[in-house]
Image (cartoon, helix red, strand yellow):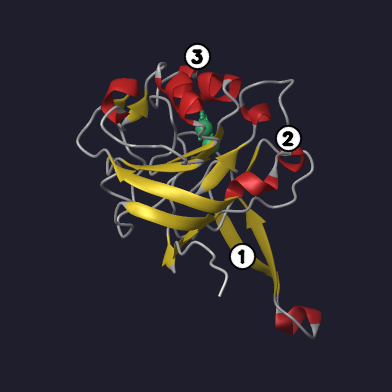
Amino acid sequence: MIDISRRLENGVPTWPGDTAFSYEVSWSKEQSGSVNVGKLTMSIHTGTHIDSPFHFDNNGRKVMDLDLQLYIGPARVIDVSGKSSVGAEDLAEYDLEGVTRLLLRTSSWSKPDEFPSEITYLRADLAPFLEEKGIRLIGVDVPSVDPLDSKELVAHHGLHACDIHILEGLSLDHAQPGDYELIALPLPLAEADGSPVRAVLRPYTPWKRS
Ligand SMILES: Nc1ccccc1C(=O)C[C@H](N)C(=O)O
Ligand SMILES: [Zn+2]
Ligand SMILES: [Zn+2]
């Protein structure tokens, strides 16, 4: 199993100005008499997480309304590193027939201990291209599918319009391009605009009848 999640610990990089990550034992074993009880404070868009449409659309669906099936199942990892952005023409060379979940290894977040200043982003023509191929989930190894300074969030909205779900902040350094089973389930957060996920890849072996 390959862990493609970023570690969550105090000091982990967050969006500039966003809530810092903090874990602390707020009620110690000595105080409670029986157990250590932790307290977590974080922005949902820290580390490896999914966006729900409410993140960028006030009328959009919340995490609980999302189809869980999309976050578990066959996925393909492809390497697009070295590109400043990715559009339909960059993926034309790949055979994406039958792919539902596509993870893009951009390798553009080179210093994991710092929030990046520039990342590979997705161009507007990518979403319709992916939709045409039948892709329902896109994953990236950067904090956003749009440029970091974007206010319009063209890629977020475009993917949403094509009913393609967004998984961000993956760590794909150790995931060689190929086919896997992805597991990246969101938490049952009733009202949330996204959720942290523990994302893993398992070798993909199509189930066979013996
Ligand atoms: N947390 C933020 C704080 C300020 C400005 C943007 C963000 C984002 O989260 C943007 C990005 N679309 C994201 O889904 O991660
Ligand atoms: Zn996000
Ligand atoms: Zn996002």
Q: Does the closest atom of ligand 2 sit within 8 Å of the Cβ of label 2?
A: no
SS for dot 1: strand
* Disc 1 Cβ-to-ligand 1 distance below 8 Å: no
Q: Where is residue 134 in the image (x, y as percent from the top left)?
A: 52, 32
From the Cβ of disc 3, is ligand 1 less than 8 Å away? no
**Residue type highlighted by circle 2:** Lys
Quadrant in which residue 121 is drawn: top left
Of labels 3 and 2, the one closer to you: 2
Query: To which residue does mark 3 refer?
Result: 152
Mark 2 crowdedness (10 Å alpha carbons): few <14, some 14-19, many ≥20: many
Of the pair 2 and 25, the residue shown nearer to us: 2
**Sooner in the amino-acid sequence: mark 2 or mark 1:** 1
Residue at image location 39% in from the left, 40% down from the top: 142
Which amino acid, by three-letter code, is at mark 1?
A: Glu
Under mark 3, the amino acid is Glu
Q: Say the numbered circle drawn on residue 24.
A: 1
> In front: 89, or 187?
89
Q: Distance between the residues labelled 2 and 1?
A: 28 Å
Return the residue at label 2: 62
Could you say whether the residue bearing mark 2 is in a helix, strand or loop?
loop
Kindly report which numbered mark, 2 or 1, lies closer to the viewer in this rendering: 2
Secondary-structure class at tag 3? loop
- What is the C-alpha distance between the residues marked 3 and 1? 36 Å
Where is residue 24 drawn, in percent x and y?
61, 65
* 145 up-or-down from 190: above or below: above
Is there any visible trace of residue 10 in the rendered image? no
